[in-house]
Amino acid sequence: MVDINRRLLLKAAGISAFGTIFPSVGYLISAHAQEVISKNTAPSAKRWAMLMDISKCPAGCRDCIDACHGIHNVPLINEPGQEIRWIQKVPFSNAFPSQENPYSDISLKKREPVIMCNHCSNPPCVRVCPTQATFKRKDGIVMMDYHRCIGCRFCIAACPYGARSMNFRNPRPYIGSINPDFPTRTKGVVEKCNFCEERLAVGLPPACVAACRHKALIFGDLLAGESEIRTILRNNNAFRRRPELGTEPHVFYTG
Amino acid sequence: MKSEQDMTGHMDKNKITGRIWLCFLIAVIAIGVFFYLRQLSMGLSITGMNQNITWGLYISQFTFLVGIAASAVMLILPYYLHNYKVFGRITLLGEFLAVSAVIMSVTFVLVDLGQPGRAFNMILHPSPKSILFWDMVVLSGYLLINLVIGWVVIESERQGVASPAWVKPLIYLSIPWAISIHTVTAFIYAGLPGRTFWLTAVMAPRFLASAFASGPALLVLLCLILRRFTSFDAGKEPLQTLAKIIAYALATSIFFVLVEIFTAFYSGIPSHKEHFQYLFTGLEGHTTLVPWMWASTVLAFAALILLIIPAARKNEKWLTAACIAVFISLWIEKGLGLVIPGFIPSPIGRIGTYIPTGPEIAITLGVWAAGFLVLTLFYRLFVSVRAQSSSAVQRTE
Ligand code: SF4
Ligand code: SF4
């Protein structure tokens, strides 16, 4: 027990230290973090999920992307087709190809929802992985074991959301400044959003949620009846990406 | 009648050709190895693959070659189940072709891995839900079965004795096993949500149909090469029968593709149509594969006509042309035309482009050359054993 607490403390310290290295996003992350830590000391949930209010997300804002890619050592490779992305903004019709209609409000078409791994309940990426390098945790997070992945990219073919990226090359030279508290990856493995499991473990919300000034991103436990995300889902019409495929995505959208 | 001197002169020339062939293969392998070492150090970034199209030439070759391996069953089945004696001369050639093709396809998977050093993770942490795991199981099983059969049969032939009784059940087992390797390989594609081009129940039958055309086509060509350069002559009849098998299989394969096209276009569902549009007309100006697919289509129909018309089929020049056409056509269709459009458009609507790079092509050719090296060595053994046993027969007569 002592050990675990020590580890959590160290992690929290590391993450706050990160805040001092990247003041712009770090400030936001750690400010929000204090608040959440005090509210939620038990770092366990039954089913984590994310919700995005598309209407609150202003065009051109990249706070969530920068925060995520910054702390997770996601390389910045500018060649088309080579980019590694954990979280990205795409035009509405690309995120929701079957929900477009020619008469929809122009403002909807202009919207750029944030997309990431949906941490599906029935994830095809886990089903197809021949080494169990991709696996699903009890709390719904779909994880990557970078040390076990053989780089067959079967999971990329299986994911219907384009949520995974392959390290076609060694990513390290493309990382602006390395966050020492999070591992970097090697060439030849697949990577993706991990719902910030390292932050959840110390009671912090995901970096993108913490970094969003517009409160467009909500994160929480679906099985905790009174959680914010659960309340919003109860009272609003939310939709998901390609629900017809039966993967049960756990990133929801409203707005 | 040829004089003895003529014969030896002829033999010497063939020996030299054989040596040149082997040197050529080894050179191609060496170039492939050179570029593979570069791939090992630089990663798959030396290929043309990208985040939108994550499987390319390597996996295409794998898919195509599993078909070639499975097609050995087209010889085994008539010979052992229907007692079609004519194939007795060449079943071993089919088995050795299967062995070489499996070796090539497995090599292509290994070459495609981002972290080949960890390949054993597939065995250390097996995941029975993954079709790739089952593909590994059936492919290695098939390799083993065919190696044992080929070895035992040729060894008994060499000693001039009948094959031991226990290979029979193994040979029968190899029939459903051949079907299984290509079915499981089709399931790698067919069971993925959101990849509509591959999400079709006709995928496995389609794979088998095209395999039963391309494999025998290659075998006919190999037999003709053997006749030209060695003392082994398969004879006319087995080749004619193979040609008929190719014709039926090719017709079935074309039929399956047309069925897919009907379903996509009559239903009018964009996500089903787009892949075929990409292949045959181009999608939003992206036309990389269009000339290839039309070449494949024209070759397939031309070959079908040649194989159906008896006069053309019986003429060995036309037969050769038809077999080359079938092979190239299905190599395009099962390779590039199957793997790449599955990724287009991407799940977020991007139309990626994939063009194999020089190093990637060099590695691919290297693996093919390695396969042909194995095949050449097997066929040499086969020819020498057959020459021995036929001269033994003559002596006893
Ligand atoms: S979004 Fe893709 S990568 Fe994430 S869990 Fe679902 S299938 Fe897997
Ligand atoms: S690339 Fe890695 S994570 Fe993806 S299926 Fe292969 S081994 Fe699993």
Image (cartoon, rainbow, N blue to C red):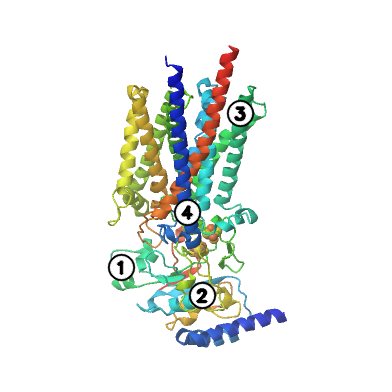
Q: Nearer the viewer, mark 3 or mark 2?
A: 3
Q: Chain of mark 1?
A: A
Label 1 to label 4, Cα distance in Å? Answer: 56 Å
Please provide percent x and percent y for residue A249.
Answer: 50, 65
Q: Residue at x 38, y 76 (%)?
A: A55
Q: Amino acid at mark 2?
A: His
Is B108 located above or below residue A249 in the figure?
above
Snapshot quadrant of residue A58: bottom left
Label for residue B153?
3
Q: Is residue A50 visible to us here?
A: yes
In the picture, the quarter occupied by the C terminus of chain B is top right
Mark toward the viewer: 2 or 1: 2
- Residue indicated by mark 1: A104
Q: Secondary structure at mark 3?
A: helix
Amino acid type, mark 1: Ser
Tell me the quarter of the picture where residue B120 sits.
Answer: bottom right
x and y percent of residue B246 in the render?
A: 42, 31
Q: Are marks 2 and 1 in contact (CB under 8 Å)?
A: no
Element at label 2: loop
* CA distance for labels 3 and 2: 59 Å
Q: Is mark 4 within 8 Å of ligand 2?
A: no
Subunit of label 3: B
Check if mark 4 and mark 3 are on a common chain: yes
- Tell me what residue is drawn at x 31 percent, y 33 percent: B302
Which residue was labeled with disc 2? A72
* Disc number for residue B34: 4
Q: Chain of mark 4?
A: B
The amino acid marked with disc number 4 is: Phe
Q: Position of residue A93 (x, y in %)?
A: 35, 65
